[in-house]
Image: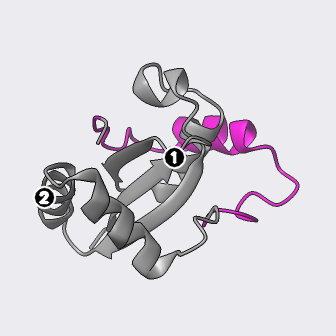
């Protein structure tokens, strides 16, 4: 069974992005290095502020859609229930290795993970 993740990332202005992936480390690296054109690159969404682990991708997708349907205040409450300071939960994931190198290496080694839209 391959785990799936629902995650929320934020920019400095606390603009939020909710997504789903089967490879959270790769997805976060892609966001941090602005390798995904669109919303997250345009708004410089770079901090992982929340994530949940799911056993099946269909459940993760259902949860992602649920969260995207919420008002911003409810999303903020969810984030702050696990991460009151909005710290980057991926801090230290990449060690001395640049997040871009991690993203490019993982992309070459794996099949594409799921992509999703903003909030």
Q: Residue at the spot x=64%, y=66% of the render?
A: 87
Query: In which quadrant will I find the N terminus?
Result: bottom left
99 above or below 62?
above
Q: Residues within 10 Å of mark 2 (few under 14, many from 20)?
A: few
Which disc is residue 66 wearing?
2
First-in-chain label (1 vs 2): 1
In reply to whether residue 41 is colored magenta, the answer given is no
Horizontal and vertical percent position of residue 111: 39, 41
Residue 98 occupies quadrant: top right
Rendering coords of residue 94 (x, y %): 74, 57
- Residue furthest to the right in view is 96
Which residue is pictured at 33% across the width and 48% down the height? 19
Which image quarter holds the C terminus?
A: top left
Q: Left or right of 31: which side holds 62?
A: left
Pointer 1 local density, CA inside 10 Å: few below 14, some 14–19, many at least 20: some
State the image coordinates of residue 16 (x, y, percent, origin top left).
41, 45
Rendered image: mark on residue 60: none
* Residue on which the image places disc 1: 14
The kind of secondary structure the magenta stretch mainly shows is: loop
- Relative placement, left or right, of 98 versus 81 is right
Q: Range of the magenta residues? A: 89-117
Where residue 77 sits, quadrant-wise, is bottom left
Up-down relation of residue 33 to residue 106 (above or below): above
Q: Nearer the viewer, mark 1 or mark 2?
A: 1
């Amino acid at each position: 069974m391959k785990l799936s993740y629902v995650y929320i990332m934020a920019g400095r202005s606390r603009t939020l992005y909710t997504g789903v992936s089967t490879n959270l480390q790769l997805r976060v690296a892609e966001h941090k290095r602005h390798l995904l054109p669109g919303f997250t690159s345009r708004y410089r969404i770079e901090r992982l502020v929340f994530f949940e682990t799911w056993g099946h991708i269909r459940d993760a997708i259902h949860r992602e859609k649920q969260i995207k349907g919420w008002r911003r205040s409810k999303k903020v409450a969810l984030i702050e229930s696990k991460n009151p300071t909005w710290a980057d939960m991926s801090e230290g994931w990449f060690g001395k290795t640049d997040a871009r190198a991690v993203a490019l290496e993982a992309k070459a080694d794996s099949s594409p993970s799921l992509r999703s839209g903003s909030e």
